[in-house]
Image (cartoon, rainbow, N blue to C red):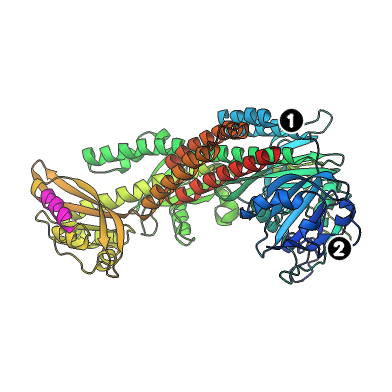
Amino acid sequence: MTVRLTSIPAFGEADLSNCEREQIHLAGSIQPCGALLVAREPELAIVQASANAAGLLGLDGPITGRPLTALPGDLASRMRPLLELPMRTVPASLRCHVGARGETFDALLHRPPAGGLVIELARADPPRDLSGLLDRALHHVLASASLRSLCDEAARFFREVTGYDRVMAYRFDEEGHGEVFAEDRAPHLEPYLGNHYPASDIPQIARRLYVRNRIRVLVDVDYVPVPVQPRLSPLTGRELDMSLCFLRSISPLHLQYLKNMGVAATMVASLVVGGRLWGLIACHHYAPRLVPFEVRAVAEVLAEAVAIRIAALESFAQAQAEIAVRRLEQRMVEAVARKGDWRAALFDGSEALLQPLGATGAALLFEDETLTVGEVPGTPELRAIGAWLDVQPQRRVFATAAFGLDAPEFAPLRAIASGLVAVPLSEAPGEYLIWFRPERIHTVTWGGDPFKPVIVGNDPTELSPRRSFAQWHQEVVMTSAPWTPAELTSARLIGETLTDVVLQFRAVRTLIARDQLAQVEGRLGAAAQPVLIADPAGAVILSNRPCRDLLQAAGSMPARLEDLAACCADAAEIRRRLAAVLRERRYWRGDIRLRLADGGQRPLMLRVDPVQAAPGRVLGFVVMLTDLTERNAAAAARRAFQDGVVDEPPRRAGRSDSRADLTLRRLLLPIVENAQVAALEITDGVEMARIPEMLDSVRASVARAAELLEHMLRRAR
């Protein structure tokens, strides 16, 4: 492959060596199916316009320099009520009559980040009432019980409402490769269902735009671009940011890609889940096709609803995995109480340990001992794997479906260990719980050979290897079945549980065997969670560094258990509680607010466990401190979600008993219900730190859907 070393290429000047950096949002031109105007606010003087604007509107002479109020028709008066809206993420829409001929146009308005007001005009089709179809589609989305059925329904409804020849639900994997996950097509077309496409087909800059602009339309692959004049904005001196422009020109590289496929027109809707691009709904047509605004609006609302449902289904799968993990945790807790050890319970019955991850074998490397279940490598190989993991970047869950490719020295183990997931049990080296999967020799069907040499040249027709999209079959070896997000969640939860169990187990052993204190203290001190140990009288005899760092930030390190109260905001109440713990030799757990030396406070959960040597005899107390910052942030996010999704949309839709508001209320109901289900599954199935992000994503999707519906219904009025 010949690589041309260049700076960031301007729009239309990229080749296959630098298309990842092509500035596709600075297109400087539009598709000729409409016209674009840029106005300076507040006077609304036109400072930029597409070269076809005057002709489309039947006007003589240049259009730049004119105020919008001087254009024939009612554009200026119809848009004036919308100027109070931000219009930075969702363009506002209206229907108007503008131009010398008084034609009816659909107008889209938005404000790019650098300022100004962008108005896009396209001739309007007769209005259609699609609310019934949308209502039916939304209820089908809410009723979908699996990703497969959801994507099948989405492809079917998209094709029904848009009329495109082919509609595909396209899902990305962790490496960015795409798979046609669902499809609805005209009977004469060859199927693409199950085809895979390499990540390089969609540059990263395009993926970022798909997150910002959720609906993109190409009317005719053979169109002649219409330039925006002047090219540089008089408002900024720079090129116009066209990220949210419906009419924005398409990269010549992508146009050639579509021509190579035989596609003449497209519409693509983004599926954004948790702030990331989960996939696309890609619509293809084999003749030029422009869909009216109503269809695009319905498609965008439906895409947001599908994304919310995906979040709910994926979170539900993770919640189910957590239930299985909690059962395993309960068994270990009971084993510790009965036998003083947790390892036997972990391996008592293979299904409890293997089933949550769909693994065929597992191994525990702990304190120089090895316990196994199922099909696993031999003990020397397991110890070598532990040493290899020690030198990898530390993470809560290490996972690979191509272990022999990542570490060629372990390739001979591929029959039983092509897939590997490992969780550390502590900060000590060589202590892991590891799951294994065998090699899965399988065939991947690509839409064209993705491994042919790439020819780079100035001629855009040289788009090898993507000139052929005939199915190309690749036999994949040295890999296992991929680990799913739910399985990795199970591994993380088991790892977190074992980390706590290991920490508790070692604390108990410290009290039972004081002669082993020196050996155990090092491992206890390496734990990331703050913990301290007190003797039966409450004197602190041991604490780890995280605990000391935490309490010293509050001003002092307590010598006795009751002295913890001096570090707390509610000192008197906490002292009373701790005194009762010491007096009654009982367990206590409660929330405290640690006072910091700088005047701030940190929310913590304080857990005190008495260690019973025999009935009526306590060896001491184990105290663990857990930071509740993430939990409180999640609670705040749930309150904000309640206000922003459950309360605000009904208030917005219930301002009057007008027909439009009744329609809005009816359409919002399944969207809000869908969001509530997603919120429940997110709260139950997602790790604490990600709950605010996921709830905010769902809330934003509902807000976008509500805003889109309001614009659609406002324009219909």
- Check disc 1 and report the residue beneath it: 160
Tell which of 151 and 381 is nearer to you: 151
- Above or below, 475 against 512 in this view is above
Determine which residue is flagged by label 2.
457
Residue 357: x and y in percent read 48, 39
- Sequence-earlier tag: 2 or 1: 1
Q: Which quarter shows the N terminus?
A: bottom right
In-image side of 170 versus 489 (left or right): right
Q: Which mark is residue 644?
A: none
Residue stretch in magenta = 571-582
Near mark 1 (Cα within 10 A), the count class, few <14, some 14-19 or many ≥20, is few
Q: Nearer the viewer, mark 2 or mark 1?
A: 1
Judged left or right of residue 423, residue 216 is right
SS at mark 1? helix
Kind of residue at disc 2: Gly
Q: Is residue 329 magenta?
A: no
- Depth order, front residue of 679/709: 709
Q: Residue at x 32, y 61 (%)?
A: 526
Quadrant of res 324: top left
